[in-house]
Structures are given as C-alpha cells and as structure tokens.
Image: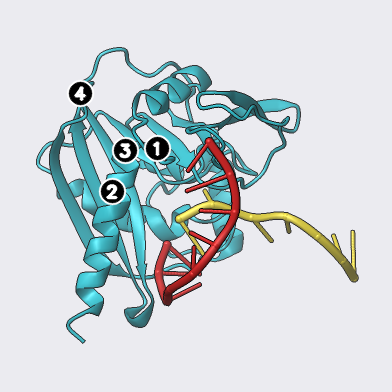
Chain colours: A cyan, B yellow, C red
DNA sequence: GCGACAG
DNA sequence: ATCTTGTCGC
C-alpha cells in the first residue's frame, strides 16, 4: 500500500494518506486464542517538548504483566484533532520494536475507526504493525449516540454517517463513558468484549491504566533532576 | 461564519 | 497531553 511509513507530511498530505490507509483496515472478530495483550500510551513532557511512549504486555487472559518498554523522542508532528496518529505512532512503533515478545493484540489510548476518515490511532498503529488493535478513548472525537444507562457495563452504539463505528461504554457506575472502537483486525463486538474483560477497579481498563502510569512515571523522571 | 475537536 | 485543591457523591 501507499507509503505506510511516511511521517514527514503536511496536514493536508496526512489527511490524504489517511484516506488511502483506511481502505486497508480490516474489520473482523479478534482471534479467540492468543497469548499476549499489549497496551500503549503516550506522555507529554512540556519543558523538553518530548513524548514518552510506553508499551506494556500482559498474559492473556489473566493479565499478568510480562514486560514494559518505552522511548523518549522529540515531537515531529503537532497535535491536530483527527491527525493524532501522525504524532504518536512513530514513537509507539519504536517502543514496540524494543519488546522482546511483541503483543498479539494491542489496546490503544485513542480512537479506532471512530474517526472522521475511519483511521484513528488504533487503526493506524494496527496497520503499521500488522496486528489486531482496539481503540479505547476517554473522549469522543466524532459520531453521535443515545443517552447511556447509569450502570457499569451498559453501552450504546456510536454512530457516524448512518454507520456504527464503535460503542460508548460505561466502565463504572455513573462515571463518564469510554469510547471503544475497532482499530484493525477487530470488530465491534470483540472490541467491546476485550475491553470489558480488561476492566478493573477504575474507569480506564487496567492495561491502559498501567501504560499511562508508566508514561507518567517516566515523565516525572525526566522533569525532576532539574 | 459558528461550533466541535482523540492525545 | 499537562498545569492543580478541595470537594461532592457513591
């Protein structure tokens, strides 16, 4: 496919690339059996203008931590809503490369196909790595949905242009919902199920919460010796 | 033109 | 994303 690894792009070129890459996203049920689940998150170091990419892996289905990897890198692309992946995918690819045992499925902190051009961070990253990826965002980027029941476990479709692109999911009683959408080699139901399986005591699924914790911890490490 | 807008 | 204390509610 066209320039899967093109990162030095103008916003206009990035949008065109998204339209091209979106045609290669495959929606299908996640594999029923696999061994390693990965979780990816990014932290921002304002003073040095750097990103901290963290990737953790866990055993499936018991979610015991296997290993962690991270990379600190300069920011090569600004944050523009809809173009997040061009900022975060490069460092995440490097963090992935540093793992001894790469994950079979990846959970990402951001949207999958619940994106204006059907190519959110999880889709882009999944395509680059050639593995199943699921998007789990804390905020809505696009799409509309009905009101959501108050209780943990309830969900409602996220609809974009007449199409269901994800689920708005209540991970704990009364908390703000999370936005689940398939990234690549995943579908709506299996994406929702895998996230549901990863729920712990907090709003954010445990693997992603731990990835965020590591990124945050590393970020402080960079800021403190100053 | 106005409002919305992942991290 | 990150800056930040107390505070309301389950």
Separation of residues labelled 1 and 4 (CA atoms): 26 Å
**Residue A24 visible from this viewpoint:** no
> Residue A187: horizontal and vertical position, in percent?
49, 21
The crowd level at tag 2 (other Cα within 10 Å; few <14, some 14-19, many 20+) is many
Image quarter in which the C terminus of chain A is found:
bottom left
Q: Residue at x 64, y 25 (%)?
A: A156
Query: Up-down: is A202 above or below A190?
Result: below
Q: Which residue is mark 4?
A: A62
N-terminal label among 4 and 3: 4
Separation of residues labelled 1 and 2 (CA atoms): 21 Å
The crowd level at tag 1 (other Cα within 10 Å; few <14, some 14-19, many 20+) is many
**Residue A83 located left or right of residue A70:** right
**Nearest the eye: A209 or A55:** A209
Mark 1 or 2: the one toward you: 2
**Residue A163 visible from this viewpoint:** yes
Number of marks present in the image shown? 4
Image quarter in which the N terminus of chain A is found:
top left
Mark 1 or 3: the one toward you: 3
N-terminal label among 2 and 4: 4
Q: Which residue is mark 2?
A: A211
Q: Are marks 1 and 3 in contact (CB under 8 Å)?
A: no
Residue ranking furthest to the top: A32
> Residue A186: horizontal and vertical position, in percent?
43, 24
Q: Residue at x 75, y 27 (%)?
A: A162
Q: Which residue is mark 1?
A: A127
């Amino acid at each position: 496919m066209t320039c899967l690894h093109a990162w030095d792009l103008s916003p206009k070129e990035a949008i065109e690339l998204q339209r091209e890459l979106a045609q290669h996203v495959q929606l299908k049920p996640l594999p029923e059996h696999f061994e390693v689940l990965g979780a990816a998150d990014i932290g921002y170091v304002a003073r040095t203008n750097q990103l901290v990419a963290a990737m953790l892996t866990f055993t499936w289905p018991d979610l015991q931590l296997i290993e962690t990897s991270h990379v600190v890198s300069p920011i090569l692309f600004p944050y523009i809503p809809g173009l997040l992946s061009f900022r975060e995918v490069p460092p995440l690819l490097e963090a992935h490369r540093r793992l001894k045992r790469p994950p079979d499925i990846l959970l990402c902190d951001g949207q999958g196909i619940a994106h204006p051009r059907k190519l959110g961070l999880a889709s882009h990253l999944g395509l680059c790595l050639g593995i199943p990826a699921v998007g789990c965002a804390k905020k809505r980027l696009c799409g509309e949905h009905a009101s959501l029941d108050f209780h943990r476990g309830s969900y409602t479709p996220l609809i974009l242009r007449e199409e269901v692109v994800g689920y708005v999911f209540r991970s704990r009683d009364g908390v703000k919902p999370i936005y689940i959408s398939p990234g690549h080699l995943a579908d709506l139901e299996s994406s929702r199920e895998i996230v549901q399986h990863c729920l712990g005591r907090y709003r954010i699924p445990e693997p992603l919460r731990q990835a965020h914790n590591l990124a945050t911890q590393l970020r402080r490490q960079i800021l403190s010796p100053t």
